[in-house]
Image (spheres, helix red, strand yellow):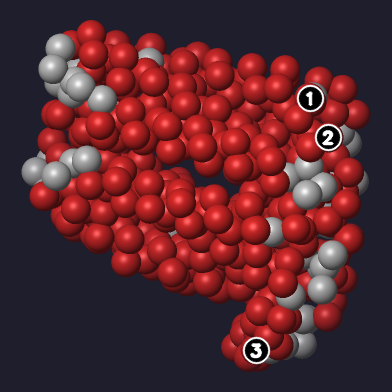
């Protein structure tokens, strides 16, 4: 991992090194988002609706992401939509008064999928294919290392209560994230593929480029490798929605203090860091399938603990929450870098932006109803979102186990 970081050059190096400017503020406020919305009198169902609005906007952004990345270039698209999807929403969140502020912010923030596509292209298009898993692992590691600042968020919440503390954290996010976007734009170069696509689309309107997406949909759904990557991505996108309600679950159902939410990410980061440096190098020779299956089983065990373990005492409640965080971190380390790498490996380089765009659009479109569904279930019983996840885990386990294409990293050659 350290050798990979030292050897990185160009855009991949800048993308990795600037990631903490986004990851640190995000890790500070993200554990408390649902509590912040609840403190401003949003119901669980309304929180779920906000999640669905975000997913709808993300689906729209995913559809436009490839078009804009080709038309404007990876570099310009990234800075423009980073500012729209993060800088502006941070200000809206900082001054939010009711449900509608969160709806507008979610609609803008969902456009992050545009910049996710363009930024992903900046990261991987000039990188060596054999190092992709390690590069994505470095990105995840940058996010996890940022949680060393989590105690500051806990101190703010304990000292000021949730609403004023979150307003301060969102304002800090506004400045830190904006700095990242400016630095990335200043020091990154347009990729080789990006320059080619800009020339090819120079005389075309955005609508004309979108019209050409019909053949991209056909190409995606005619490739068993890309369909597999799409289905796996959809499963884990739906699974992540329940995470919006973890804070409400442990503070209301397990009766843990709000400030504790800032410390759970520290445990998670320690586990993920251990996996990235110690476990990952040892399991990389196993390919994709077996580590991902082990990760899904860890997810199942963590969710089962959260739902079914006796939580009648404070010690039992805390142990349950810690077990969930520990097992979820193990699962994340085994599954997510491989999920990201699968998408990168199975996509044809010359059409990366448009193919990733279509795959993300389909993934997010499938997930849109789950935001409302999970919020509605949580209003009835806060265990139900996690029970729904167990069903999705079962489906994803069967899909991964049945796939022969995930046996090894040699699958990167199976594009069509």
Which callout, 3 or 2, points at the residue further toward the start of the chain? 3
Is disc 3 in contact with disc 2, using a CB cutoff of under 8 Å?
no
Secondary element under disc 1, as helix, strand or loop, is: helix
Which callout, 3 or 1, points at the residue further toward the start of the chain? 3
Disc ID at residue 321: none
* Image side of residue 403 versus residue 260, left or right: right
**On the rendered image, what quadrant is the N terminus found in?**
top right
Give the percent coordinates (x, y) of residue 102.
25, 52
Give the percent coordinates (x, y) of residue 376.
17, 56
* Image side of residue 355 versus residue 1, left or right: left
Going 88% across and 36% down the picture, which residue do you hit? Answer: 9
Task: In the rendered view, tell whether residue 382 sits above or below residue 375.
Answer: above
Residue that badge 1 annotates? 282
Disc ID at residue 214: 3
> Which is more toward the observer, 196 or 255?
255
Task: In the rendered view, tell whether residue 325 sits above or below residue 365.
Answer: above
Secondary element under disc 2, as helix, strand or loop, is: helix
Going 42% across and 47% down the picture, which residue do you hit? Answer: 240
Disc ID at residue 285: 2
- Residue 216 showing in the rendered view: no
Is disc 1 in contact with disc 2, using a CB cutoff of under 8 Å?
yes
CA distance separating discs 3 and 2 = 38 Å
CA distance separating discs 1 and 2 = 7 Å
Q: Residues within 10 Å of mark 3 (few under 14, many from 20)?
A: few
* Image side of residue 193 versus residue 391, left or right: right
Q: Residues within 10 Å of mark 2 (few under 14, many from 20)?
A: few
**On the rendered image, what quadrant is the C terminus found in?**
bottom right
Give the percent coordinates (x, y) of residue 191.
84, 57
């Amino acid at each position: 991992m350290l050798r990979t970081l030292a050897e990185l050059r160009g855009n991949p190096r800048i993308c990795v090194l600037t990631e903490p400017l986004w990851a640190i503020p995000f890790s500070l406020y993200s554990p408390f988002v649902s509590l912040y919305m609840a403190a401003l009198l949003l119901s669980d169902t309304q929180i779920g609706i906000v999640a669905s609005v975000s997913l709808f906007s993300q689906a729209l952004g995913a559809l436009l992401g490839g078009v804009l990345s080709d038309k404007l270039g990876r570099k310009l698209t990234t800075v423009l939509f980073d500012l729209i999807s993060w800088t502006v929403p941070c200000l809206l969140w900082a001054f939010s008064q009711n449900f509608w502020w969160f709806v507008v912010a979610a609609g803008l923030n969902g456009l992050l999928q545009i910049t996710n596509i363009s930024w992903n292209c900046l990261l991987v298009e000039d990188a060596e294919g054999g190092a992709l898993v390690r590069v994505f692992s470095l990105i995840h590691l940058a996010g996890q290392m940022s949680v060393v600042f989590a105690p500051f968020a806990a101190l703010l919440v304990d000292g000021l209560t949730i609403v004023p503390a979150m307003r301060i954290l969102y304002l800090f996010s506004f400045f830190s994230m904006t700095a990242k976007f400016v630095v990335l734009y200043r020091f990154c170069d347009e990729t080789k593929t990006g320059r080619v696509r800009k020339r090819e689309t120079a005389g075309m309107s955005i609508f004309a480029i979108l019209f050409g997406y019909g053949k991209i949909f056909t190409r995606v759904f005619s490739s068993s490798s890309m369909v597999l990557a799409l289905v796996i991505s959809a499963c884990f996108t739906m699974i992540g929605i329940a995470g919006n309600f973890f804070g409400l679950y442990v503070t209301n159902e397990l009766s843990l203090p709000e400030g504790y939410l800032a410390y759970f990410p520290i445990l998670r980061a320690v586990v993920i860091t251990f996996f990235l440096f110690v476990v990952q190098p040892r399991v990389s020779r196993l390919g994709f399938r077996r580590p991902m299956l082990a990760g899904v089983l860890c997810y199942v065990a963590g969710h089962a603990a959260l739902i079914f373990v006796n939580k009648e005492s404070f010690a039992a409640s805390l142990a349950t929450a810690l077990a969930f965080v520990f097992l979820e971190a193990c699962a994340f380390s085994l599954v997510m870098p491989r999920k990201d790498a699968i998408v990168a490996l199975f996509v044809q380089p010359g059409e990366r932006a448009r193919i990733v765009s279509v795959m993300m659009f389909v993934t997010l479109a499938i997930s849109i109803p789950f935001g409302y569904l999970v919020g509605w279930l949580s209003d009835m019983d806060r265990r139900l979102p996690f029970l729904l996840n167990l069903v999705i885990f079962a489906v994803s386990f069967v899909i991964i186990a049945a796939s022969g294409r995930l046996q090894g990293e040699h699958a990167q050659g199976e594009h069509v």
